Image (tube, grey):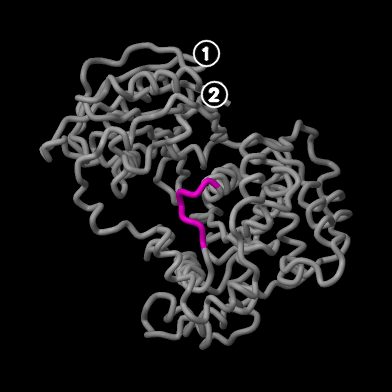
Amino acid sequence: MTKNRAVLKGLSLLTTLCLLVSQAVGVTGGPELPNPGKAPLTHDQQIQLGLKAASQVYQQMPVLPDNSPETQYIRQLGAKLEAVIPKQYSWPYEFHVIPQKEINAFALPGGQVFVNVGTIAAAQNEGQLAGVMAHEMSHVYMQHSAKQAGKTQTTAALAGIAGAILGAAAGGVIGSLAQAGINFGAQGIILKYSREDEAQADAVGAIIMYKAGYNPRAMADFFKLLASEGGAGPQFLSDHPNPGNREQAIQQEIANWPPKTYVTSSPAFQQAHQQASAIKVYTAEQISAGAKNGQWARLNRQNGAVFGPNGGAVVPASESAPAPIALSNVLPNQHMVSSDLGFVNIARPDNWQLTMPRQTGESIRIAPSAGVAGNNVGYGVIIDALKAQPDQPLDQVTSNLVSALQSGGDDLQPVGSAQPISVGGAKGLSVKMQSTSPFPDADGQSQKERDWLVTAQRSDGSVVYMVFVAPESQWDKFSPAFDSMLKSVRLQ
């Protein structure tokens, strides 16, 4: 069953019913994000520009693979921040981690965000790290790079950039990026931001933090911490000119906002913080030297950190025809770890990876790496949420969801009717379904797959759904873990 594609195609038929949780679930009241205005480059052109620049990053800098714990954590935190941005102003944010010692982070047009391991190690709590990321996401939100290009380039030059972005011009990628204010230097990516841009990113980032449940003061605290290091300071402060009185400006910004209880840190941050202090990192000088001889492009390919044409990691051709899977490679262990997904908290086997959505239409995935082939999940759990229409009963939402999944082009079929179930103390429904597994059986033959759909209504009316997946013949090996995961669910 191609779960992500089925959900994407099916849900497109339900636009009158629901929206993805990232567009629907968020903090209400308090400050609102501003209209970012227009830029001389279109939405699609900015996305393509960012993808081209990101592909260059993967050629000239080391990047951790998507399944690394550090990357998974940064994506989880990024998704929590992205969830509060209104749909009409959002971008397909994607988050990456660079094993660089220096404290830095940068965001490319269209939503590609890179965070240095040194930044994760330097942050004293999750609020400070969220502040850095919200600041970078705000540069994308306000389209600062594209607007900067409009200030410094003629109309003809902008047309040339757009042509190169969309593939109309051959070669000259670096030159085209430089025209839009994106340079590759000894310190990696350098974007041309003004003090006005920085002040605006602080202000917008503060709103994103507040809506996501973080104290905006943590952003100023981190910048103040960096400035106290003396000397030239971290590269971050060189790339991001200080607009002046940062702490005072943020304090004034939030003075009249409704009070709330903020998230300071989390076990996930503490784990990522410790891992960041132990991981092998490189200095800016080492990265610059390695880029000259292609060291990082080779290392990234070896590690599976390869940037694809659509912004994702390239899937090896061999994965297009999955081979039989050894049960030992996908069985969940008994050690469970808690994962806060923003709208729901769930425990998962610690040998199964948590993968956050990379773009609109994808769902959260908890699965063993060997149990996923491209976009197809053969072993694991798919999690997402919908916003139902007012007063729409859960059974109707569930029925529509089943129909949407079936319309996705799969052979999915319900087995029996929906049954009541309790999910984290809330009313839920359970639907047993069956389809064809993306993985063949031990003899290389096609096999049936069980897909267990569970839905539950949150207090705000939105509906969380989970699809537990495993081959029918092996279901009894996985059902204890699935039951434990479901019992651990806490709706937020």
Q: Where is residue 143 in the image (x, y as percent from the top left)?
A: 60, 65
Mark toward the start of the polypeptide (1 vs 2): 1
Q: Where is residue 160 in the image (x, y as percent from the top left)?
A: 47, 85
Is 282 placed above or below 415 here?
below
The chief SS type of the magenta part is: loop
Q: Position of residue 166 (x, y in %)?
A: 40, 75
Q: Is residue 424 visible to the viewer in this orientation of the structure?
A: yes
Query: In this figure, which residue is indicated by the disc labeled 2?
Result: 491
Quadrant placement of the C terminus: top right
- When asked about the image quadrant of residue 436, the answer is top left
- Residue shown at 40% from the left, 12% from the top: 421
> In the structure shown, which secondary structural element does the residue marked by tag 2 occupy?
strand
Query: In this figure, which residue is indicated by the disc labeled 1?
Result: 425
Q: Position of residue 198 (x, y in %)?
A: 74, 65
The amino acid pointed to by label 2 is Leu
Is 148 left, or right, of 351 in this rendering? right
Is 30 placed above or below 201 here?
above
Q: Do the residues labelled 1 and 2 touch (CB within 8 Å)?
A: yes
> In the structure shown, which secondary structural element does the residue marked by tag 1 occupy?
loop
Is 168 placed above or below 383 here?
below
Read off the magenta span.
Answer: 63-69
Q: How crowded is mark 2: few (under 14 residues within 10 Å), some or many (20 or more)?
A: many
